[in-house]
Image: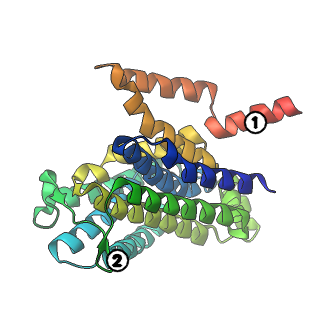
Amino acid sequence: MKPTTRGFLFLAFVLAVLPLALPNAYYYDLAIRIAINASIAVGLNLLIGYTGQISLGHAGFFGIGAYASAIMTSRYGWPSAVALILGAVATAVLAFAVARPILKLKGHYLAMATLGLGIILSMVIVNETDFTGGPDGMPVDAFTVFGVQIVGEQTWYAVVAVMLLLVTRAALNLIDAPAGRALQAIHGSEIAARVAGVDTTSFKVRVFVLSAVVASVMGSVTAHYVGFLTPGVAGFFHSIELVTMVVLGGMASVFGSILGAVVLTLLPQLLSAFEGWETVVFGLILMLTMIFLPRGIVPTLRLKFAGRAA
């Protein structure tokens, strides 16, 4: 059995038995937020970790999905599933439109361009007060399927757990396919990949759109789960948080992305005892982790264990 298959089965086992260890709604809420962040991080890792294209604007795509669902369902009474799909389609169209000019840039120029895109999307949400509620935010109706509302932490946990498994399986399949090897070739050397016959622009655009759509769908899910949106969901700091999950867990590692999401979602809760100093301790932990685990947690530990085994 391949290591990735074992990892996927282990993830499925953990998600299946985890409810047995969740004593109350607070822990269910944490598990749901972890699954949402992990799904976005897995999609973002395809772009950053496997293709080598930095994005500091993915919270903007998250915001598009979240506010598209919120506006269409709460203001116009559209079905929740239709709103989710239309939000994802709108995100895909926008991501496709901006991907070609943006992805021609490299390194910090690309990072700055995606940062600018995220800021524009965030400002649109803040300023369009008639639709989004502006800085005050807006309430979101419950997700309804054929007249049945999805409510309760246990139900939402089941939904996001299945979605995380689907995103993870899709990412693993993509990586094992020729398309995945093309993405890794682009990360290694774009010129060499082009010489080998890889249509680098097409692959970069497609993975950019794919990661944006994943963020948009999870934004829609978050909007209905939380029930209230503020512009912060599309803000710069949320984008940085998502990128940090990928880097901390391990770039070019699907399971590293999931672990990064687990760590960065739980740490603020665990550090609440350091009253007033939790941010300092949080930054110190991240610094030490990156100093001693420079490739990210999962890839560094994998290399160390492989070295000992050899």
Q: Is mark 1 on a helix, strand or loop?
A: helix
Name the residue nearer the viewer: 84 or 111: 84
| Image position, residue 264 (x, y; %) | 45, 38
Name the residue nearer the viewer: 281 or 166: 166
Residue 30's disc is: none
Name the residue nearer the viewer: 280 or 103: 280
| Image position, residue 129 (x, y; %) | 11, 61
| The N terminus - image quarter | bottom right
Circle 1 Cα neighbour tier, 10 Å, few/some/many (<14 / 14–19 / ≥20):
few
Circle 2 Cα neighbour tier, 10 Å, few/some/many (<14 / 14–19 / ≥20):
some
| Image position, residue 103 (x, y; %) | 50, 61
Determine if residue 53 is in view: no
Q: In which quarter of the image is residue 301?
A: top right
Which residue is label 2 attached to? 86
Q: Which residue lies furthest to the right in this view?
A: 310
Residue 303's disc is: 1
